[in-house]
Amino acid sequence: MKKNIAGTEIDVNEEGYLTDMSQWNEAIAAAIAVEEGIGALGDGHMKVVRYLREQQAKGAALTIRSMGKSGVVTTKELYDLFPGGPLKKSSKIAGIPKPVGCI
Amino acid sequence: MSDDKQPVKKMSIIVSRGSLDGIYPALIMANGARMEGIEASLFFTFFGLNALANKTLDSLKVSTVGNSALNMAMPMLGLPMTMPFPTWMGAIPGVSAFATRLMNKEMEKLDIPPVREFLELISDSGGKIYACKLAMDMFKLKKEDLMERVDGVLTVGDFYNESAGAGTHILFT
């Protein structure tokens, strides 16, 4: 389905995750962040978002454990930055698919 | 039918078993709750304290005796799930350690951390870790004997108070 985010028509799934990560830009990230109740994105958020996109491009499976060990962010910081769903919300903002694992 | 689904707000999970296969499901459920923005508390009682005691927590084993659900597929031997794991085999020295090693290897592949790291992860994510006072007394354990992330030693009453609130679910494992 299509959704207008930050003035652009974007392909998303029924949960609002981008289905084509190449359609992503920072304005879209900012708009999704507001929608998800995260508010304005700071450097800390963007570091995570960029890391997620790099990992996704590599095809790596993302887990909360691997994030904590990434050196980009600690587990605590990740929960503070994206309250209410650290990996789910950050992935949505990063324009990558919803993480499928349980860890 | 109503679409008005009441969200789960908090999971209070009681862990009463002390084998590796007894403890992991609770840790996975607690971590999974935090990842969904759901509060999580773990209350370790009876043999569940094995997961908190520094002396035992890094060497927990899969129970290969009296575990009728264990089959030859589960210890990742590549045999069919329909083939039971014979109890007499489980009693042979080293078999439990072997099954444990196989299971740990499979879990590591799925990025499931070892017990100590898993507890630290849950604690870092804002989950709470409690030990049961009665079980502590019974096993002659002190707070210093437990891993450092334990948030407190609670009575059953304290635990129920801690679990109070609409949207809390209490789960016994």
Image (spheres, coloured by chain):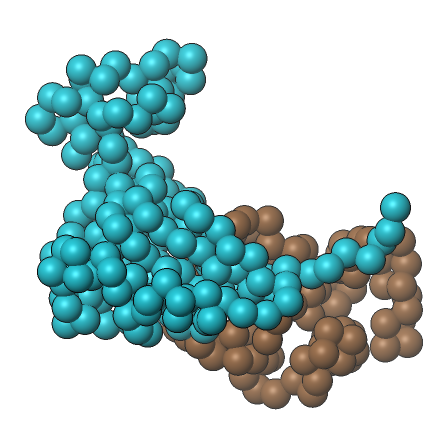
The chain whose colour is cyan is: B
Q: What is the residue that sits farthest to the top in this orientation?
A: B83
Viewer can see residue A70: no
Left or right, residue A5 beside residue B39: right
Left or right, residue B162 beside residue B137: right
Between residues B26 and B80, which one lies in front from this camera angle?
B26
Occupied quadrant, residue A19: bottom right
Left or right, residue B113 beside residue B6: left
In the image, is residue B74 above or below residue A23?
above
Residue B29: x and y, percent? 48, 52
In the image, is residue B5 above or below residue A44?
above
The chain whose colour is brown is: A
Count of numbered circles on the image:
0
Between residues B150 and A44, which one lies in front from this camera angle?
B150
Identified at 69% across, 87% down, the residue is: A40
Between residues B79 and B43, which one lies in front from this camera angle?
B43
Identified at 82% across, 57% down, the residue is: B4
Q: What is the residue that sits farthest to the left in this orientation?
A: B93
Q: What is the residue that sits farthest to the front in this orientation?
A: B157
